[in-house]
Image (cartoon, helix red, strand yellow):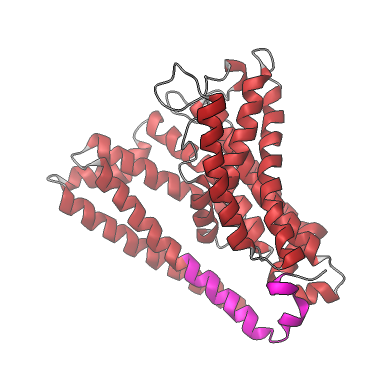
Amino acid sequence: MSATLLNRLADALGLLVTLVVALSVGVLLVVGASAEPGAALRAFFTGPFTNAFFFGNMLQAAAPLIVTGLGAVIAFRAGAVNLGLEGQVYVGGLAGGAALLLAGAHSGWFLPVAVLVGAAAGGAFAALSGWLRVRFGASEAITSFLVGAAVIQLFDLVLRRYLVDAAAAFPATRTLEPALRLGRLLPPSNLNASFFLGLSLAALVFVMLFRTRFGYALRMTGSNPRFARFSGLRTKRSFVWALALSGAFAGAAAVLEVAGVHGRLITGFSNDLGWNGITVALIARLHPLGVVPAALLYGYLQVGANAAGLLSDVSPRVATVVQSVIFYLITAQALYVWFRRALGRRADRPGERGALGPGGGPRA
């Protein structure tokens, strides 16, 4: 068996063991917190499949994470650490949501335009971090995080000062016109077309990364920038484009969530879509098709926690703790594998520094 195949089998086995350990910890927490552990565990593990409401919400919980997870995959594949996905979700939601509010009642066709507006806003903020990296050597991890944190505060400021609906009980805009919202496919759940759009995007990103010259340039920029440079690939451009696409996916996911679930902009609408998208990408081992089952796992755990809180004596807070423990363990294992591979690649390329720009950024 080849070393590559053995590594993949070891990674798969490690993920399986981590998942079993994490679920075992969750079971122990539920048993300790419930007077009827059997009913609580049954609600947690089978709740998402008991009715249309839970099942549809499980699929819908995965939908935006598929999109933000794909954005994280594109960035990481190109060697860019985009820690600003959460901020890019908010700026995309703000731009696309404002466009929807201005569209009017008879402009249902404007929804795709608003998605593009949100994608452009998220992509522009992410591309800024990429440009700072290749131009000045500034770490894109730090700049994307700082810019993202500032954008989240900017979102709240604009929402509360300029877009808020005075009749709302909490900071929120007026409700979008029905023509500008995504219809529910499995009432009474929130499932809408964004889930199937996410599946289509996963297939498109797979083709882009592994079947096109552009995708090859992105992957080589991340895996071996020195080889990419001497092969004539424009690594600086690939690096910036990867971050721009990453932010664009985050911005598009935000508009789809606003139009499909919330129906208006509200404070805190993201619910960590950017950070959880990074988690999903790491669990998927940065494979675009693996993002789909990873996001579905997140949706399953989220709805399972909600079902346990509603159908048993387990407090919703305990159910959330169970969900968090499971994902922290899985994410830690995924991060370990990712860092191990990154360090291994650096050890195999002792002369790589000469192929990088100031501060470690890729040269043209």
Residue 293 is covered by the magenta coloring: no
Residue 14, quarter of the rendered image:
bottom left
Q: Say whether residue 350 is magenta.
A: yes
Q: Residue at x 40, y 45 (%)?
A: 300
Q: Is residue 107 visible?
A: yes
Residue 210 visible from this viewpoint:
no
Among the 4 quarters of the image, the one containing residue 223: bottom right
Vertical position of residue 103 compared to residue 317: above or below: above
Q: Quadrant of the C terminus?
A: bottom right
Instruction: Tell me the chief SS of the magenta region.
Output: helix
What's the magenta region?
A: 334-361
- As drawn, the residue found furthest toward the left would be 35
306 or 72: nearer the viewer: 72
- Asked if residue 247 lies left or right of residue 145, the reply is right
Location of residue 212 in the rendering, given as x and y in whole percent from the top left corner? 80, 57
Q: Nearer the viewer, residue 336 or 173?
A: 173
Tell me residue 199's x, y (percent).
61, 43
| Percent x, y of residue 152 | 53, 43
Q: In percent of the image, x 64 and y 62: which residue is there?
A: 140
306 vs 5, left or right, is left
